[in-house]
């Protein structure tokens, strides 16, 4: 699957508080570090396999381990309505 | 002590509006077009607000699209890095304008609706033809791929249509609906006898919202703002005065709450003369009710003091004449009986519609 942000949802840098934040209609949430790594790779072009490959390389970790983390994270973001398939 | 930075800016771009809702949140004394700030002045304020820590802006009014420069204003808000919400009645939108707003970077549209059916909606909003225009506007917003929230203000005269309002949100493709009970200051206080719901209406509405939330889970988010006349604890108004939020009126007055001008005698600094950061940090109007130091008894030392922040300052002023009093919505307020008395005397049907005061 190729994840992308739901309409009206985007990742925004919160300059004043030095953090990243997911902005959505009338709500916002602060992603944890792992979620942020995934969110920054979501551009509507990269599919899940490409995201896993990028993160596996970046963190020099085995792809199957990263794949499980990414899956969990994407499911969570989909449940929150931030990401659509 | 430097206060934590604000999260959101309400930009009241104009008080002009084709609708005349009797619960309008604008002040009784409306600002005329000549007093409104320019595109450039708003752009500057957006930049200041973002640097101060605001993450989002609500472009509101009156009707924000009554301004001819609404597209430029939207672009300026986005350029400043703010998440940009348009709070609109929808009656001035057409396909071209919606597309230009989308291209300017608009993030989200909140569309107001006065009732579920044309007759009631147009009587309450005081504008013929409004409901059909809103139906069309919802379609245009969705066709442009913009997320839509329906804002249904509810009260004595439309609560019986709450299930239909929720159905309307689904029909119009909204992902969210705000079911917002009227809050009583300014115009709404003038019309309180016509608007206050009965306890039975409130309980029915609460049950309807609860059932609809589970029925439409994953498809429609329902936010519910309860009316505090039936409550025993006040609402944590604005998340605390001067703590999370600031509003800028059409003429540049910087307010801790959009209704703050209803507190007569309070003086507000103007963004045309004073930087927002300075106003946020130490303007006397922002400092007046910030934190807990200003609190009288029974708020002082109360276990709820940092949960509800003493409730709503505008409501305290409107009902007791003292903006520093405990909100009468609190059962511990010596004025709590005023709410029960207001509920007993409610039952009017006519409205005093919002209007500009006679020219002086």
Image (spheres, helix red, strand yellow):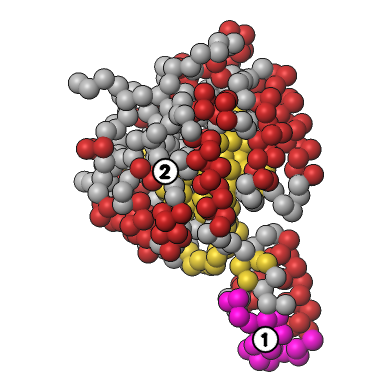
- Disc 2: which residue: B92
| A29 to the left or right of B65 | right
Residue at left offset 76%, top offset 82%: A67
| Above/below status of B206 relative to B106 | above
Marking on residue B297:
none
Q: Chain of mark 2?
A: B
Please rate how many residues cluster around mark 1, counting C-alpha atoms within 10 Å: few if below 14, some from 14 to 19, many from 20.
Answer: few
Dividing the picture into quadrants, the one containing residue B35 is top left
| Above/below status of B82 relative to A63 | above
Magenta range is A43-64
Q: Position of residue B324 (x, y in %)?
A: 44, 25
Q: Position of residue B210 (x, y in %)?
A: 76, 37
Q: Is residue B165 magenta?
A: no
Residue at left offset 22%, top offset 38%: B34
Residue at left offset 77%, top offset 31%: B207
Q: Secondary structure at mark 2?
A: loop
Q: Is residue A47 magenta?
A: yes
Q: Chain of mark 1?
A: A
Of marks 2 and 1, the one in the foreground:
2
Spatial separation of the CA atoms under disc 2 and disc 1: 45 Å
Please rate how many residues cluster around mark 2, counting C-alpha atoms within 10 Å: few if below 14, some from 14 to 19, many from 20.
Answer: some
Q: Which image quarter holds the C terminus of chain A?
A: bottom right
Is residue B359 at least partly visible in the picture? yes
Residue at left offset 58%, top offset 15%: B339
Query: Which of the two residues, B171 or B264, is positioned nearer the viewer here?
Result: B171
| B177 to the left or right of B316 | right
Q: Secondary structure at mark 1?
A: helix
Is residue B325 at least partly visible in the picture? no
Please tell me if label 2 and label 1 are on a single chain: no
Q: Position of residue B27 (x, y in %)?
A: 37, 28
Marking on residue A50:
1
Query: Which of the two residues, B117 or B181, is positioned nearer the viewer here?
Result: B117
């Amino acid at each position: 699957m190729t994840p992308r942000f739901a309409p009206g949802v985007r990742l925004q840098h919160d300059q004043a508080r030095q953090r990243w934040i997911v902005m959505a209609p009338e709500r916002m949430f602060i992603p944890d570090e792992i979620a942020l790594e995934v969110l920054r790779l979501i551009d509507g072009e990269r599919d899940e396999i490409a995201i896993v490959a990028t993160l596996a390389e970046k963190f020099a970790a085995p792809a199957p381990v990263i794949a499980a983390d990414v899956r969990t994270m994407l499911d969570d973001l989909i449940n929150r309505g931030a990401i659509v398939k | 002590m430097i206060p934590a930075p604000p999260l959101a800016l309400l930009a009241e771009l104009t008080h002009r509006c084709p609708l005349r809702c009797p619960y309008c949140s604008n002040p009784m004394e409306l600002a005329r077009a000549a007093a409104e700030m320019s595109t450039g002045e708003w752009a500057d304020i957006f930049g200041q607000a973002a640097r101060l820590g605001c993450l989002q802006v609500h472009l509101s009014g009156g009707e924000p699209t009554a301004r001819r420069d609404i597209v430029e204003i939207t672009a300026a808000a986005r350029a400043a890095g703010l998440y940009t919400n348009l709070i609109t009645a929808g009656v001035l939108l057409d396909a071209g304008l919606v597309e230009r707003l989308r291209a300017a970077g608009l993030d989200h549209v909140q569309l107001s609706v006065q009732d579920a059916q044309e007759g009631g909606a147009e009587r309450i909003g005081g504008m013929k033809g409004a409901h059909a225009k809103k139906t069309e506007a919802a379609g245009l917003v969705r066709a442009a791929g913009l997320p839509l929230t329906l804002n249904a203000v509810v009260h004595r005269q439309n609560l019986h249509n709450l299930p239909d309002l929720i159905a309307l949100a689904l029909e119009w493709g909204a992902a969210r609906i705000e079911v917002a009970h009227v809050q009583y200051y300014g115009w709404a206080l003038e019309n309180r006898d016509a608007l206050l719901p009965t306890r039975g209406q409130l309980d029915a509405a609460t049950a309807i919202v609860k059932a609809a939330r589970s029925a439409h889970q994953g498809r429609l988010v329902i936010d519910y703002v309860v009316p505090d006349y039936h409550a025993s604890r006040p609402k944590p108004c604005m998340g605390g005065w001067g703590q999370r939020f600031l509003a800028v009126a059409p003429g540049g007055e910087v307010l801790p709450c959009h209704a703050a001008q209803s507190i007569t005698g309070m003086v507000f600094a103007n963004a045309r003369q004073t930087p927002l950061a300075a106003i946020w940090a130490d303007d006397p109007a922002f400092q007046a009710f910030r934190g807990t130091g200003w609190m009288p008894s029974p708020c002082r030392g109360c276990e709820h003091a940092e949960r509800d922040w003493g409730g709503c300052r505008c409501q305290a002023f409107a009902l007791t004449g003292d903006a520093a009093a405990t909100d009468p919505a609190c059962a511990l307020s010596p004025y709590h009986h005023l709410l029960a008395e207001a509920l007993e005397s409610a039952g009017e049907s006519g409205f005093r519609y919002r209007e500009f005061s006679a020219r002086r």
